[in-house]
Image (cartoon, grey):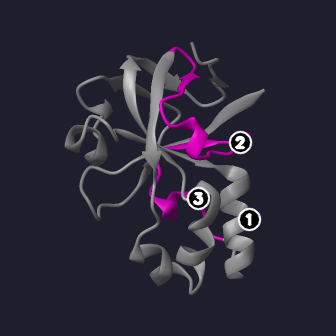
Amino acid sequence: MAKLIGIATHPTSKAAITEHQSIKVSKESGLENDYQGAKNRKTQITLLSLKNWNLACQEAGKSIDWTERRANLLIDDIEFNDQMIGQQIQVGSVLLEITKETDPCARMEALQTGLKQALTPNWRGGARCKVLREGTLNLGDRVQLLARV
């Protein structure tokens, strides 16, 4: 069973990251007080796979804290891919829909030479989601991909 093992937000584009034990999620703004959520309702929340982050860091030759990726939610046991677009994912009581891949930006290369390239294949940079059902997220919440209907 996959679990939510990290929650992070930043109030503006280049602001410092704040980690949370729990956080409210709304359809209007995504994660409470997060820059990304209010900007575009189709890409409100970013998900990152711990396995893929670690693999990219290993390929780039440096261990880097996941918050440097500036993703919102760290998931321990799900890898994202093209076939997941449109799929619903439940995190605790919150329901999300995967809308697109999170492309790695130049900031990743500034962190470590080769990191942007290492994040590029196989959705290693993560997934973007829109909020379908509001609620509160808590570290340790169960994460489940729902069957397509």
Left or right: 33 as drawn, with respect to 99:
left
Q: Residue 36: give x, y in percent of width and height.
A: 29, 46
Q: Amino acid at mark 1?
A: Leu
* Badge number at residue 55: 1
Q: Is residue 16 magenta?
A: no
Q: Earlier in the sequence, mark 1 or mark 3?
A: 1
Counting residues from the start of the chain, the first of labels 3 and 2 encountered is 3
Relative to 37, say whether 63 is above or below.
below
Q: Residue at x 73, y 65 (%)?
A: 55
Q: Quadrant of residue 43?
A: top left
Residue indicated by mark 2: 76
Q: Amino acid at mark 2?
A: Asp
Q: Are marks 2 and 1 in contact (CB under 8 Å)?
A: no
Taking the magenta stretch, the answer to whether it contains residue 78 is yes
Whole-Å distance between the Cαs marked 1 and 3?
12 Å
SS category of the residue bearing label 1: helix
Q: Position of residue 102 (x, y in %)?
A: 46, 54
How far across and down, in percent of the image, does residue 39 sit? 21, 44
> Of the residues shown, which amino acid type is indicated by label 3?
Trp
- Residue 69: x, y in percent? 50, 61
Please give the range of residues in magenta: 64-93
Q: Quadrant of the N terminus?
A: top right
Horizontal side of residue 55 vs 141, given as left or right: right
- Give the Cα separation between the discs numbered 2 and 1: 13 Å
Q: Which mark is residue 66?
A: 3
- Residue at 52% over, 57% down: 67
At 45% across and 61% down in the image, what residue appears?
103
Marks 3/2: CA–CA distance: 12 Å
Contact flag, marks 3 and 2 (Cβ < 8 Å): no
